[in-house]
Image (cartoon, grey):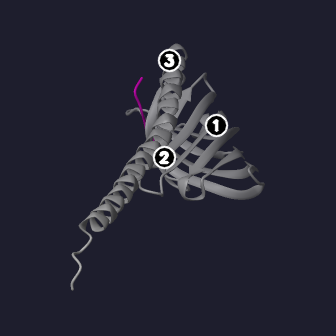
């Protein structure tokens, strides 16, 4: 005598499997939104900092320049900003980020710089300068779930064009990781900025 298949048991297993799949999908969606939130929070804080620097540069203009934004390539590469505070002092920074599943990242640093212009060169098309300073930054990497805090000692050369509100720069920065563990290395960048005021 053949026994009828237990449809109730099969249906229960299907419901259980469906619940597991639904939970997995929902948890992945929540995790993705959490990743985006973490990066967006850092971006919003950085945008706030940029707005503050723009407000400062409106009050103090050096070399007919206030706030500049551009790009830098090297280590790392990203959005480069600079705000002049006086004739020879400025604040500069770099921002870069990625948003992707399990590999999101965010990097930023901010430096205070002093400048020395080579006025004896007497070039008609612009002014060359060197600069040095100190700064701080942090980097967040999702795949290791860690944030690194570091100190920088940047120095480099730059050139301000007279006819266009653009500068070029070449920079090298000894860098010291101070948290979560100590490390020492060099970062270097080449880039440009376009000045908005």
Q: Are marks 1 and 3 in contact (CB under 8 Å)?
A: no
Q: Position of residue 73 (x, y in %)?
A: 48, 54
Is residue 132 in sight in this rendering?
A: no
Residue lying at 27% horizontally and 63% vertically, measured from the top left: 8
Tell me the SS state at disc 2.
strand
As drawn, the residue found furthest toward the bottom would be 1
Q: Position of residue 145 (x, y in %)?
A: 60, 53
Within 10 Å of disc 1 (Cα), the crowding (few <14, some 14-19, many 20+) is many
Going from N to C along the chain, the mark reached first, 3 or 2, is 3
Going from N to C along the chain, the mark reached first, 1 or 3, is 3
Identify the residue position indicated by label 1 in the image: 111
Q: What's the CA distance linking mark 1 and mark 3?
A: 17 Å
On residue 96, the disc is: 2
Which stretch is magenta? 191-197
Q: Are marks 3 and 2 in contact (CB under 8 Å)?
A: no
Q: Position of residue 92 (x, y in %)?
A: 57, 35
Q: Between residues 10 and 80, which one lies in front from this camera angle?
A: 10
């Amino acid at each position: 005598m053949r026994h009828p298949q237990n449809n109730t048991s099969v249906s229960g297993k299907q419901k259980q499997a469906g619940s597991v799949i639904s939970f997995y999908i929902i948890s992945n969606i929540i995790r993705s939104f959490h990743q985006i939130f973490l990066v967006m929070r850092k971006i919003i804080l950085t945008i706030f900092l940029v707005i503050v620097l723009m407000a400062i540069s409106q009050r103090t203009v050096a070399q007919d320049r206030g706030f500049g934004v551009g790009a830098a390539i090297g280590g790392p590469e990203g959005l480069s900003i600079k705000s002049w505070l006086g004739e020879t002092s400025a604040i500069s920074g770099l921002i870069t980020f990625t948003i992707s599943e399990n590999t999101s990242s965010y990097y930023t640093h901010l430096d205070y710089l002093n400048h020395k212009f080579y006025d004896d060169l007497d070039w008609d098309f612009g002014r060359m300068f060197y600069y040095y300073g100190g700064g701080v930054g942090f980097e967040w990497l999702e795949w290791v779930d860690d944030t690194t805090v570091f100190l920088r000692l940047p120095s480099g050369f730059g050139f301000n064009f007279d006819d266009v509100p653009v500068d070029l720069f070449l920079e090298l920065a000894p860098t010291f990781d101070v948290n979560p563990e100590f490390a020492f290395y060099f970062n270097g960048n080449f880039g440009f900025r376009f000045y908005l005021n």
